[in-house]
Image (cartoon, rainbow, N blue to C red):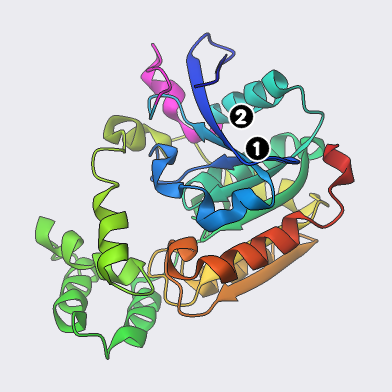
C-alpha cells in the first residue's frame, strides 16, 4: 500500500488501479474511504486511478489535530499527494462530498488541475442548497417502484422535520437507479467505512467561503465535467446544473436512470462519458 506524508506529518495512503496518465480520485461520504468507488465501473481500463484515502479513513493515519479534517484544510493533503507523485499537474475526479474538496483545491491551485470531473457532486462549497421540494420532485420519478410508498413517506418526514432514524434508512433506495441485489450489496458494503467524527468536522464553521470560491472558479479555465444522475435524490440534476454554470468551460451531463453512484447503475455508460472527457488532450499530464 503506497503512502506519503502530509505537510503536518500525518501518514496518508492511496490505492492505484490501471495504467496511463494519472487521475487523482477523491471519495465522498464525507470522510469515507475509497473502497466504495471500486475501479469506478472499469474506468481504470482507460486511465490510472489514484484513489486517495483521506486522513482518518481507510489505511490513512488519524491526525493529531481533529480540526484538520475540515474540508479547506484537506486541500493541503491533495497538494502533498501531487508533490509526492511528482506531477506538475494532474486530472482530478471527485464524487459527492469530495467535490467540495476538489472545488476548493481547484480554486486554490488552478494551474495544477488539467481537467476536473465532478461526479454527482455535493454543492456546499459553492453555496448551492437544493430545496426539500426539489428533492421531492426527483423522488416522484420513482413512483412506480415497489418500495416507493414507504420510502416516499420517510422522505416527506425528513423534509418536514419529523424524521426518525428509520426514516433515513428507508430512503436508501432513492440513491440507486435500481434497488436490486447489486445495489443493496454495494450499499451494505459501505457500513463501517466512514469516519463519523471526521465527517462532523469536514463542513465545520470556516470550511467554506462560497463567494470567494465562486469567484475563483469563474476564472478556472480548465475543462470541467459535471455528471448528474437523473434520479439522484442527493445531488439532484438542477443543483449540479447550477454548479456547472459557475465554470467558464464546463460540460453538464445527466446519466439516464442513474442515482448517486452512476458507475453501479450503468458502468458502460458512465465509463464512456467520463473516459471520453478525461482522454481529451491529456498531453498536459505527460
Residue 120 shows in the view? yes
Residue beneath the point at 69% across and 40% down: 19
Q: How crowded is mark 2: few (under 14 residues within 10 Å), some or many (20 or more)?
A: many
Question: x, y percentage for residue 125?
Answer: 54, 48
> In front here: 103 or 143?
143
Question: Which residue of the protein is positioned furthest toward the bottom in this rendering?
Answer: 144
Mark 1 sits on what residue? 105
Residue beneath the point at 19% across and 75% down: 151
Mark 2 sits on what residue? 78
> In front here: 154 or 82?
82
Question: x, y percentage for residue 119?
Answer: 55, 58
Q: Is residue 256 left or right of residue 163?
A: right
First in sequence: mark 1 or mark 2? 2
Please tell me whether residue 212 belongs to the stretch shown in magenta. no
Quarter of the image with the C terminus in it:
top right
Question: x, y percentage for residue 165?
Answer: 12, 56
Residue 127 shows in the view? no
Quarter occupied by residue 163:
bottom left
Spatial CA distance of label 1 from label 2 is 8 Å
Q: Is residue 37 above or below residue 252?
A: above
| SS assignment at label 2 | helix
Residues at circles 1 and 2 in contact by the CB criterion of under 8 Å: yes
Please tell me whether residue 61 belongs to the stretch shown in magenta. yes
Residue beneath the point at 56% across and 48% down: 94
Q: Residues within 10 Å of mark 1 (few under 14, many from 20)?
A: many
Question: x, y percentage for residue 6?
Answer: 56, 16
Residue range highlighted in magenta = 59-72
Residue beneath the point at 37% across and 18% down: 62
Amino acid at each position: 500500500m503506497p503512502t506519503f506524508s502530509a505537510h503536518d506529518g500525518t501518514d496518508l495512503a492511496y490505492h492505484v488501479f490501471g495504467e496511463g496518465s494519472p487521475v487523482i480520485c477523491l471519495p465522498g461520504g464525507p470522510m469515507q474511504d475509497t473502497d466504495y468507488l471500486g475501479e469506478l465501473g472499469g474506468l481504470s481500463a482507460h486511465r490510472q486511478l489514484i484513489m486517495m484515502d483521506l486522513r482518518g479513513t481507510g489505511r490513512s493515519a488519524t491526525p493529531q489535530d481533529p480540526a484538520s479534517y475540515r474540508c479547506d484544510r484537506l486541500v493541503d493533503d491533495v497538494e502533498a499527494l501531487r508533490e509526492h507523485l511528482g506531477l506538475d499537474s494532474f486530472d482530478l475526479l471527485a464524487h459527492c462530498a469530495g467535490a467540495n474538496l476538489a472545488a476548493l483545491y481547484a480554486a486554490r491551485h488552478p494551474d495544477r488541475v488539467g481537467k476536473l470531473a465532478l461526479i454527482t457532486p455535493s454543492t456546499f462549497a459553492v453555496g448551492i442548497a437544493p430545496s426539500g421540494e426539489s428533492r421531492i420532485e426527483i423522488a416522484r420519478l420513482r413512483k412506480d417502484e415497489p418500495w416507493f410508498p414507504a420510502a416516499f413517506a420517510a422522505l416527506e418526514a425528513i423534509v418536514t422535520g419529523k424524521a426518525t432514524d428509520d426514516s433515513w434508512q428507508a430512503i436508501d433506495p432513492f440513491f440507486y437507479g435500481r434497488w436490486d441485489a447489486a445495489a443493496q450489496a454495494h450499499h451494505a458494503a459501505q457500513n463501517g467505512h466512514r469516519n463519523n467524527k471526521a465527517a462532523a468536522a469536514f463542513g465545520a464553521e470556516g470550511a467554506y467561503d462560497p463567494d470567494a470560491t465562486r469567484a475563483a472558479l469563474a476564472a478556472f479555465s480548465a475543462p470541467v465535467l459535471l455528471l448528474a444522475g437523473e434520479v439522484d435524490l442527493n445531488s439532484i440534476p438542477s443543483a449540479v446544473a447550477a454548479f456547472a454554470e459557475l465554470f467558464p468551460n464546463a460540460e453538464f451531463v445527466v446519466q439516464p436512470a442513474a442515482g448517486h453512484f452512476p458507475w453501479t447503475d450503468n458502468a458502460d455508460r458512465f465509463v464512456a462519458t467520463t473516459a471520453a472527457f478525461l482522454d481529451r488532450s491529456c498531453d498536459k499530464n505527460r
